[in-house]
Image (cartoon, grey):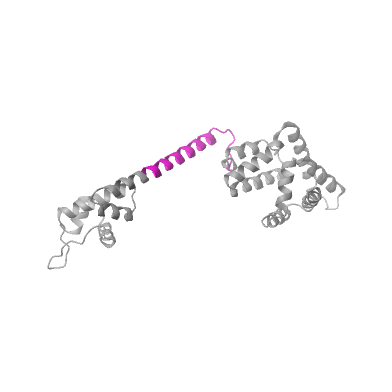
Amino acid sequence: MRIGELATLVGVSTRTVRHYHHLGLLPEPERLANGYREYRLRDAVVLARVRRLAELGLSLDEIRDVLADDQGRELREMLLELDADLAREQAAIAARRARVAALLAEADLHPDSTVSPDMAEVLRGLPTGSSTLAEFDRELLTLVASVSDPAGRAEVADLLRPLTEPEAYARGDALVARLDELADADPDDPRVAVVARDLAAHLPDEMVSMMIASLDGTSTGPWLEELLRELPAAQAEVFQLLVTQLKERG
């Protein structure tokens, strides 16, 4: 058989046959006087064996080891490892499908709904309305959740959960409205200091402790600077004063 006939018989491309030769998975056959390779049925048997192992999911290096093991011990060990890998992949796919199903069941689906379920629950319980600032705050929280590890996301959700309680929600909603009123105000507006004071009082103690600890972190400075650059002058001044008050409180 010529290489094209062998490839057709086994159901692979001639390029694949040559690649297997290069890797040593398929021995080089004898060549005819004209230089063409002359394949036998034994070559087809070996090539089909390589193809079957590859279709199972074994790597080419693993296939080489399997073919070198006449007793089949290497194959059994590798198949056990492959089965464990497939079980993990199956569990991960099942978890993803369950998450997708939960998202599809939501009435108001939003791109930020794709954060972790506990974080999505908390975000739904925070004030939003038509406030630009509240929406920006939600986007920042979503960003924090996206770049945190699972433990960090759970911690953020736990810190925010007290703010979803009815009384805290009402206070937060009122504070958001007061912050919105400062959108076009001057930084020295007397309302700025009052809102900063009330915002500091509104935050739960656990959140304050976390914020105080993070204020000295190397990654906090750039975040705070970017936040202040995004806000109108008076609102930025509120958060500047808030940071100062939290440091003093700590």
The spot of residue 97 in percent (x, y) is 47, 37
On whether residue 105 falls in the magenta region, the answer is: yes
Identity of the residue drawn at 73% across and 35% down: 169
State the count of labels: 0
Left or right: where 54 falls relative to 221: left
Identity of the residue drawn at 21% across and 53% down: 46
Q: Nearer the viewer, residue 20 or 109?
A: 20
The spot of residue 149 in percent (x, y) is 58, 47
On whether residue 63 falls in the magenta region, the answer is: no
Q: Nearer the viewer, residue 229 or 167?
A: 167
Where the N terminus falls, by quadrant? bottom left
**Whether residue 124 is situated above or below residue 220 in the rendered picture:** above
Left or right: where 32 falls relative to 144: left
Q: State the image quarter where residue 28 is shown.
A: bottom left
The spot of residue 132 in percent (x, y) is 71, 45
Q: State the image quarter where residue 159 is shown.
A: top right
The answer to whether residue 11 is seen in the rendering is no
Identity of the residue drawn at 71% across and 46% down: 210
The spot of residue 141 in percent (x, y) is 65, 45
Identity of the residue drawn at 62% across and 40% down: 119
Q: State the image quarter where residue 39 is shown.
A: bottom left
Secondary structure character of the magenta stretch overall = helix
Left or right: where 37 falls relative to 122: left
The answer to whether residue 137 is seen in the rendering is yes
- Toward the left, the furthest residue is 33
Q: Nearer the viewer, residue 199 or 216?
A: 216
Q: Nearer the viewer, residue 19 or 133?
A: 19
Point out the stretch of residues depicted in magenta.
82-111
